[in-house]
Amino acid sequence: MDRDKILLTPGPLTTTLRTKLAMLRDWGSWDSDFNAVTAKLRASLLKVVHGDETHVVVPLQGSGTFSVEAAVATVVPRDGHVLVLDNGAYCKRAARLTSLMGRNCTLMPFDEAAQVSPAALEDKLKADASITHVVLIHCETGAGVWNPLEAVAEVCARYDKGLIVDAMSSFGALPIDAREVRFDALIAASGKCLEGVPGMGFVFLRKAILDGRAGNSQSLAMDLHDQYTYMEKTGQWRFTPPTHVVVALAEAVAQFEEEGGQPARLARYTSNYHTLIDGMARLGFMPFLDPSIQAPIIVTFNAPGDARYDFKTFYNAARQRGFILYPGKLTQVETFRVGCIGAIGPNEMEQAVNAVALALEDMGIASGEPAI
C-alpha cells in the first residue's frame, strides 16, 4: 500500500500533505520569523474559543498531559482542593497528576458509560466548602463520552469555583465559547482535532485570575505564568520550542480556517461517525455508549462474542489493510476503539469498515455481534 496507514485513533492522527511539508524547513527558535509564527498561532487559537477579551493562550512543549499538569500546578494554589469529575481513564490521570503535585484531590466517580452529573456536582460543592477547583474532561476518550461542559461550568460559576477543562480531544471540533462558558483554564494539544502533529500543548487562562498565579507552580518548566510573562515580553519561548511542531500546527490551523473552522470540522467528523456506526452495524458490531452521550471523536465498540476473537489478531489484520485501530480502555467489558478524527472523510471510514469486515473473515468470525 503506497499511502501511509490511516490512524483511527484519538491522536496522533492522520495529517494532510500540506501539514507534513510544513516541517521540511529548519527554524531558529529566537528568529523573528519563528516568533511571528508563534504570535499568529496564539491569536488564531484564541479565536477558536472566542476568547480574545477574556483569556490568554500559553503554548507549552510536550504532550497534552504536560499541559494538563502545568495548568493544575499554575492555577491551583498549593493549599487548594481539586475535585475531579471521574467517568474514565483520563479523569483518573488528571487526579493522579494533581495528587503528585501535592494538591489535595478528591475523585467523584461516575459510571464510564454515563456523563458526569452537574446536579451531583452541585450537591458535592454544597457539602464540601473546601473545594476550590473542579476538573472536567470534556470528551473522555476512554469510552468516548461527551461531558456537559456548559452545565458544569454554570454550577462552578454559581459557586465561584475555578474550572479546569481538559479539552484535549474536543478542542476545534466540539463547540466551546469562552463568552458563554466561564473557565479558569482550558487545555488542548497540537495532535488532535486541529490535525497538527504531536509535541505541543496549549492552555487558555482566564485573564481575571492570571496576576494571582505567579509563583503557584512548583515546576520551572511547567510554570505557565512564567511562560506567559516571558513570551509577552520577548515574543519568544523560555526554553527550546518544538519548532517543527509549531509551524506544522500553524499550517494545520490555516487549513482548519479554510475548511470553515469548528462548525465545519464538527460536521465532517459527525459524517465520519455516522458512516462508521452504520457500516459497523451492518457487520453486527454494537457501540458501547448510548448515542445521546457519544462524541463524534472516538467510538468504543463491544468486542465480538465469538470465541475466535482476539484483539491483537484483529488489530494486525486491519493494520495489514492500512488502518490502525485503538485498544479498549475500559475495565468492565472487552472493547476496542475507532477514531473519527484526523484528515479523513467518509470514504476513508467506508474503507475502514471494509478492512474490519475482511479482518473478521480472516479470523473465521461471521459477525461482530457481542456476547452481551
Image: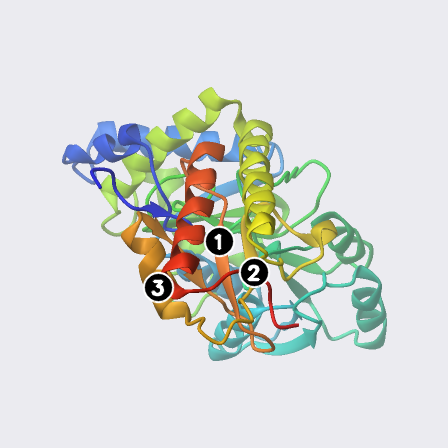
Residue of label 2:
301
Looking at the rendered image, the quarter that the N terminus falls into is: top left
Q: Decide which of 158, 358 is in the foreground and name it.
A: 358
Per the image, the residue denoted by label 3 is: 220
Alpha carbon separation for disc pair 2 and 1? 8 Å
Left/right of residue 215 with respect to residue 125 in the rendered view: left
Tag 2's secondary structure? strand
Image-based side of 151 in relation to 190, left or right? right
| Residue found at x 74% / y 50% | 292
Residue 183 locus on image (x, y percent) = 65, 50
Q: Is residue 194 visible?
A: no
Measured Cα–Cα span from mark 3 to mark 1: 37 Å
Asked whether disc 3 touches disc 2, contact meaning CB atoms under 8 Å apart, the reply is no
Q: Nearer the viewer, residue 145 or 159?
A: 145
Amino acid found under the numbered disc labelled 1? Val
Q: Are marks 2 and 1 in contact (CB under 8 Å)?
A: yes
Q: What percent of the width, then of the height, locates residue 313?
A: 35, 67
Q: Nearer the viewer, mark 3 or mark 1?
A: 1
Tag 3: Cα neighbours inside 10 Å, few (<14), some, or many (≥20)? Answer: few
From the viewer's perspective, is residue 207 above or below residue 360? above
Residue 150 visible? The answer is yes
- Which is nearer the N-term, disc 3 or disc 1? 3
Amino acid residing under circle 2: Phe
Q: Which mark is residue 166?
A: none
Query: Which of pointers 3 and 2 lies earlier in the amino acid sequence?
Result: 3
Residue at 35% x, 37% y: name it.
249
Say few, some or many: other residues with alpha carbon within 10 Å of mark 2 (under 14 / 14 to 19 / 20 or more). Answer: many
Pick whichever of labels 2 and 1 is earlier in the sequence.
2
